[in-house]
Image (cartoon, helix red, strand yellow):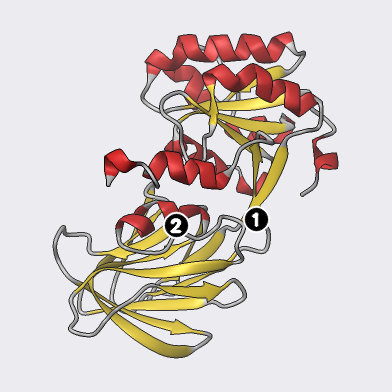
Amino acid sequence: MSQELMERIETAGFILKPESPEIAPIFEDVKARFEKRGIRVLLAERSARMIGQKGIPFEQMCKESDFLVSLGGDGTLLSLVRRSYRWHKPVVGINAGNLGFLADVTLEEVDSFLDQLFAGECRIDQRLMLAGHIRKATGAKVEFFALNDVVVSSPIPSKMVIVNASIEGERFNTYRGDGLIISTPTGSTAYNLAAGGPVVYPLTRAFILTPVLAHSLTNQRPLVVPADFAVELDTEKYDAMVTVDGQERYVVEEGDRICISVAKEGAYLLHRKERNYFSVLRDKLHWGDREWL
């Protein structure tokens, strides 16, 4: 996606961090700054009800907006990207708390962000999305998209799950343990990192399979897979839970099959031009900080 797709900067659609009515004055301040630049601000119904205002249906907001804004944290942005995916609108995250990996525009930077946006100096990254579906043994099909990750685990805490994994129809591993993470490069700094997986530059065309606490005497290691491959998973003996971006959950029973591949089109994230991924890594992970050694 290139800058010419942002020639229209007339309407911005907002969602707010859920269950956080205290965010209302922050939203009003940000809204005023947008409107001062002549940008019409739309607010999704669910967010509007939370702060006692009137909004519009989410689908209508996506259709009418030139770009979308999440006001909250990374979780709010993940939800917005996934729910708005079929409209392929650029999404920017304004962080109402600490610096995030995704929602990286702070409240103090809103004005400079808008300056850059109108000057055509912002950057639009196309981030890889996972497209998946669960084929139930009954023949039913459940579809989903993920920006961060898809996690297969037991619905019962601390209970083992057995996951068979195939790539392009060829069985290559059976994971026994607390679960399996299928992560995008964007999600590599989330659960994948906590489970010992690699950090992968967010524009890399690949995804990662990382076992969680493998119950195995063999050396079960994370696997980085090129984006043009598809992974198929099934579970043995135990029921499992599929969790998408830590927010959507689906029960998987023995005989169900989980198919995951890279979506045909990515998600579009809007960033300030000076935003540097490696600086964010250094700040968030304290790389090179002697106080954390």
Nearer-the-camera pick, 152 or 93 = 93
Secondary structure of the residue carrying tag 1 is loop
Give the quadrant of residue 171.
Answer: bottom left
- Would residue 148 be visible to someone looking at this image? no
Taking depth in this image into account, of 148 and 88 the one nearest to the observer is: 148
52 in relation to 135, above or below = above
Q: Residue furthest bottom?
A: 170
Q: Regarding mark 2 in the picture, which secondary structure is present there?
A: helix
Q: Position of residue 61 (x, y in %)?
A: 65, 30
Is 142 positioned to the left or the right of 5 in the image?
left
Percent x, y for residue 29? 56, 9
Please name whichever residue, 123 or 283, is drawn nearer the observer in this view of the structure: 283
In this picture, residue 61 sits left or right of residue 168:
right
Residue identified by numbered label 1? 266
Q: Position of residue 38 (x, y in %)?
A: 77, 13
> Considering only order in the chain, which callout, 2 or 1, is on the residue closer to the N terminus?
2
| Depicted 26 relative to depicted 246: above or below | above
